[in-house]
Image (cartoon, grey):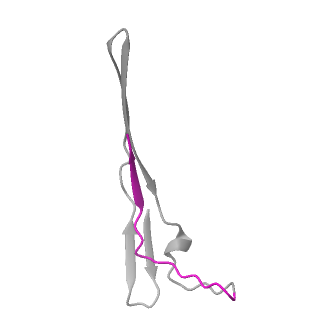
Amino acid sequence: MNTTFDVTGDDEVNSSYISLYPSAFVPCEPNERRQVRLSYSKRVERPTLRDRNPIENNDDRIVRECGSPGLDPEYSHFS
């Protein structure tokens, strides 16, 4: 997924969200009475379009919102 914002014609922010998200689960039984399980996974939380939109939102007279186009996705690793 590619996202591009070009607001003023001079400032352009390009983002590419192509990445692998591996998961693995490995069960092992060293003997009849013991079990070992290993697992790993990677998750991603991407900023929404609203979070990245650099155009100021004036829908509310009290609250003004403006996104940051340079936000990066957040990666979490679980084991």
For the N terminus, the quadrant is: bottom left
Q: Which quadrant of the view contains residue 14? A: bottom left
Q: Is residue 72 or residue 19 the one in the foreground?
A: 72
Q: Main secondary structure of the magenta part?
A: loop
Residue 19, quarter of picture: bottom left
Q: Where residue 68 sits in the image (x, y, percent)?
A: 46, 78
Q: Which residues are magenta?
A: 61-79
Q: Is residue 28 above or below residue 67?
A: above
| Residue lying at 44% horizontally and 76% vertically, measured from the top left | 69
Q: Residue furthest front?
A: 33
Q: In the displayed structure, would residue 5 be above or below residue 18?
A: below
Taking the spot 52% from the left edge, 72% from the top edge, the residue there is 51
Question: Which residue is more in the foreground, 47 or 2?
Answer: 47
> What is the quadrant of the C terminus in the image?
top left
From the viewer's perspective, is 55 left or right of 71? right
Q: Is residue 74 magenta?
A: yes
**Residue 4 at what x, y percent from top left?**
43, 75
